[in-house]
Amino acid sequence: MAATSSSSTPSPSTFPFEYHVFLSFCGEDTRRGFTDHLYQELSRSGIHAFRDSEGLEKGKNIEELFGVIERSEIFIPILSNNYAHSTWCLKEIEKIVRVVGEGENVRILPVFHKIEPKHVRHQTGPFGAAFKMHRKSRQVEVQTLNEWREALRKVADRSGYESEKMFDGHEAPLVNLIAQRVVRELKICQRKVAEHPVGVESRAQDIIKKLQFDSKDAKMVGIRGMGGLGKTTVASAIYNKIYRWFESHCFIEGIREEYPIGQKGLVGLQRELVSKMSRVHKEISHTSEGTAMLRSIYGNKRVLIVLDDVDSVEQVRAVAEKQEWFHPGSRVIITTRDEGVINALHDWEKHKISVPLMQLDENESLELFSWHAFTANSPADGYEELSLEIVRALDGLPFAIETFASSLYNNKDRKDWNETINTLRGTLLDDGIYQRLKPSYDRLRNRDERSIFLDAACFFSGIDEKAARYTWEACGFSSRLSLKALLDKSLIKINHDGKLEMHHLLRETGRRIVEEEPGRGPEHRSRLWKQQEIMNVLEERTGTNIIEGISLSDDKKEMITVKASGFASMNKLRLLMINGVHLKGGYMTMPQHIKWLQWHGCPLKSLPRDFHLNDVAALDLSYSDITEVQGGNKDLAGIRERLTLRRKLTETGFQSLKFLDLTACNQLKVTPDISAFPGLEKLVLDCCDNLVKVHDSIANLKNLKVLSMSSCRKLTELPDCISHLTSLKLLNLENCLSIERLPDSLLKKIAW
């Protein structure tokens, strides 16, 4: 094979490791049991593993298998009773030992499956019987037998896993333990793909071929298709397989929602990409500035960028407009519902390709459905036809299949199955996905689950899971059990950042359920999120005690001014989002039982004195102009004046407040005195650019579990009393570049 220059893009055949893990095993012993379970768990953990049933076609010789071994990084021989009876297995293990002996970054993690290491080491027991058989057959030379014996001895001398002595012989926890070990060994930054990635591997491989790794040019591939097809899942699988071939890599998920069109959204997208690619947080004031930064990053090294769920060409132009920006060998992957986004990128004309993501075929759909409904790869006996009918109605849409299957999990009531089928029949085109997903809501067990589902659909997608959980607890909901039920039914997810996620189809389903509540006008609905409807209700003061939640944001990125008196009649309002809103007038008439308040961009220097916040459990004032209290030790008095109605905060208690977010409150120089929030469990002070000091009163927060102050670049030290936070589990100081030392008391606590 011809040598390639350092600037060319590596391919699977030239990169040192094509596979993270090579599984060596005796098929008759473990193929359908332990080996299959381990392979699936490795795949779920984003690990590219090889087993001889995949990757090599029947009829290939041992030399080609040796080639796979040479391109693998970690070897897991599963040594079982009949392992040594297989000359194929013995050839594998001898080759593995040789490869490990020659390489610096390869290793062996042996599993002794229902066999003792001494039998492998000394070739006794079943291994002794196997070698007697090989000697009597006289089909293997003595020298080869000795080489196999030596290889087995070396493997048995390594620290491994004895299946019978761990977890009382239960295999599931052992499989999880091995997968976790591999993740640590590889130090990988894999994305979670799917619990049951049916059909993902073949689609990912097809698209990888279209990335044309034999070309030195920078290339772009667009993955297009309707919502719910699994574009993000396939893109994640591709990313996991190829990211190590690049000098820098980044996956930006959910761009459509997280970075909407407009200067603010595009700058945010650029800032996120710069931060992930350079590992440095940089302020960007305009898209032209962000473009210059990104071009300097792209031009110097081979990069991989995945832009997920793009809905406008402007989003791509902000970060990857021209092919000439990129170093040779770079790759850009886009997922989108709109093929027009890809077509509009004229500067990539000769270096891009648009790939439609195909729906699952009937067999794949049935397998995916079965995993989620029966935890098996095929339907339970007696449910084959029912499962097939549901799968056909869902027409290969993975997310809808997962949702419906999860709603029927462990449910053998045929009436429920027939009701699901009846719902799916006939009206699919007229009612669309709403009619397919609403039964999942209808079958929720109680008011708490339904309320939490609707709250998430209308307000909490993208919200910190802890903030939502504290809010629901304050509302009197069984938040832990209800949220678990929604997670189990795939109606909601928690991402790797701890944020709640809900598929847009489910979110729209929930919102339509609210819009169909009895009553003619918006004032008769439980939740409001459309700006004009909210403005009409507030201006006309037609609010009622039916309204439980309001989400009012400045869609045009301009401050909205509304009268606080417009909320007067909303006695049951518990959720309030007023981002970019200026409340005019006195606050005495504001609802008194708000549990969650998000007020991003609050224009006030301090919270209104007459705002009833005694019941609030989660308070988010990110990106606001809240200032420190002038006058040194007067902090406590000032904060109490801001957050009380008529009495001092210590007298009213604020016992319900558990979550406080002051992200990017850049007027803060000193953290406020928050000792009067005794129940606070999570405090977020990320990206407070001018924060230089942490007030000593923080030591009084005995219930604080999470303290996050990432990217507070002017913060120079922490007070010694921070070690008094007896409940603290997470202290995040990432990118706090001015902190030169931590308090000795804290270091001692960490060491302990």
Image: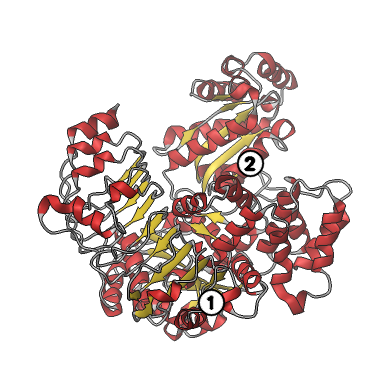
Mark found first going from the N terminus, 1 or 2:
2
Label 1 secondary element: strand
Are dots 1 and 2 in contact, CB under 8 Å? no
For label 1, the residue is 353
What residue occupies the far front of the structure in this picture? 646
**Amino acid identity at mark 2:** Ile
Q: Nearer the viewer, residue 552 or 393?
A: 552
Q: Amino acid at mark 1?
A: Ile
Query: Label 1: how many residues lie within 10 Å, few (<14), some (14-19) or many (20+)?
Result: some
Q: Left or right: where does residue 606 sit relative to residue 318?
A: left
Mark 2 neighbour class, 10 Å CA radius: few under 14, some 14 to 19, many 20 or more: few
State the SS at label 2: helix
Q: Is residue 664 left or right of 406 when viewed as pictured?
A: left
Q: Nearer the viewer, residue 266 or 520?
A: 520
Distance of label 1 from label 2 (alpha carbons)? 37 Å
Q: Residue at x 31, y 71 (%)?
A: 294
Percent of width and height locating residue 721: 20, 37
Is residue 2 visible to us here?
no
Q: How is the image coloured?
A: secondary structure
Horizontal and vertical percent for residue 600?
35, 67
Give the mark toward the camera: 1 or 2.
1
Mark linked to residue 605: none
Residue 62, numbered circle: 2
Looking at the image, which is closer to me, 254 or 573? 573
Q: Give the image location of residue 535, x and y in percent.
A: 46, 81
* Left or right for 121, reference 703: right
